[in-house]
Amino acid sequence: MKVNNLITLSTVILLANTLYFSSATVAVADEEKEILYWVAPMDANYRRDKPGKSPMGMELIPFYVGAEEGSTVSISPTVVQNLGVRTSAAELTRLWRGIDTVGYVDYDESKVSHIHLRTEGWIEKLAIQSEGERVKKGDFLFDVYSPKLVNAQQELVTALSTGNEGLIRATKERLAALGISSSQIKKLQKTKKVKQRISIYAPQDGVVSDLPVREGMFVKPSQKVVTLGDLSSVWLLAEVFERQSQWVEVGQEAEVRLSYIPGKLWRGEVEYIYPSLDPKTRTLKVRLRFDNPGERLKPNMYANVKIFGGAKENTIVIPLEGLIRTGREERVIISLGMGKFEARQVTAGIESGNYVEILKGVNEDDVVVTSGQFLIDSEASMRGSIVRMTDDAMKGAVMKDSNMSDKEQ
């Protein structure tokens, strides 16, 4: 019975040696092969620099130069050429934190006027008919009829007839509080004629960006009558992703391109960073300001924006196309030369343009595959799976044989 057990154990060790290297290609030559290290047949992580036994009592197996582990594959030069495999060396360099995003043109809110009445009344003789019309400062916009304004004017005329300076001053202040301009009050003092309708004039140059009323409508102080926007300068509101929000700072340079003017580049800087993120898009709004001679930038135009967020020094950088993301981990394919490739797990950092930072897993001057890497990665993953399955099969066979031996004893 002991002889049988020894034969069985020898058979298992021989099977483990064969299966462990079933996915590896060993260079065959007449000269004696060099041993790199000794490994346990049931645990690939248990390695020693000399022969011995594993924690399970099994003889360690030699691993020779030229043998490849499950994550390494060999491909003939012809196949490499047919796959169009391209490589790029990892560099220890500076990586600019470029933020590529989109935005839209909007009115400069510091140059927008909202016209409201300070008392209820009716709109008459509306001089503007639609949004987009241009007006100059001082242009007539509309007349308003309001009984309160008529009564306030009459009070001033009465006060003037009495000669009471205090009363005159109080009635003039009331008219000003109701929205009557100083020039209109002076004219009333001079003519002493009460006007049934008060004229409203444009407070600035601009275009009509909002006109929610029509002639004859009754309006209250809470209602907006007209909005005027000056397009001599505009805002550009860009959306920055949450993961890039810490890169952006006030004063950073930015470039803007619009599809409707190919080749034209606007250069500006970050003027303001809004304090909160949009809860739906999870983006941070950033504001840029541009002078707008000729009004080429128009509100609601779509723009491509690049914000230069400073540089990160002395970091390992590879082309972005060389990084493989699987959802659970990140990998790259390293070219080892002579048609050999290794799938290596990495930790990626920031992205900038066509490059990505590698925090762990790649060293300077490592050659990374940037084209055809998915086919190589698939082959490496398959070989790794075969090694794991054969290891599990060996463990099951040894456990079964051990149980049978215990029963026979």
Image (tube, grey):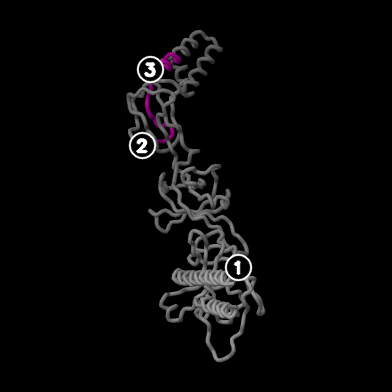
- Residue type for callout 2: Glu
Is-magenta flag for residue 142?
yes
* SS category of the residue bearing label 2: loop
Label 3–label 1 contact, CB within 8 A: no
Q: Which mark is residue 30?
A: none
Q: Where does residue 145 sit, x and y in percent of width and height? A: 38, 20
Q: Which mark is residue 92?
A: 1
Relative to 306, say whether 128 is above or below.
Answer: above
* SS category of the residue bearing label 3: loop
Relative to 366, say whether 177 is above or below.
Answer: above
Marks counted in the figure total 3
- How crowded pointer 2 is (Cα within 10 Å; few <14, some 14-19, many 20+) is rated as some
Query: Disc 3 or disc 1, which is closer to the eye?
Result: 1
- Residue type for callout 1: Leu
Query: Measuring 41% from the left and 27% from the top, which residue is drawn there?
Result: 223
Pointer 2: what residue? 131
Q: Where does residue 33 sit, x and y in percent of width and height? A: 59, 86
- Residue type for callout 3: Gln
Segment colored magenta:
135-153
Relative to 325, say whether 8 is above or below.
Answer: below
Distance between the alpha carbons at the discs numbered 3 and 1: 79 Å
Query: Disc 1 or disc 2, which is closer to the eye?
Result: 1
Left/right placement of residue 48 relative to residue 162 reads: right
Q: Quadrant of the N terminus?
A: bottom right
Pointer 3: what residue? 196
Residue 370 seen in the current view: no
Label 1–label 2 contact, CB within 8 A: no
Query: Camera-side residue: 112 or 164?
Result: 112
* SS category of the residue bearing label 1: strand
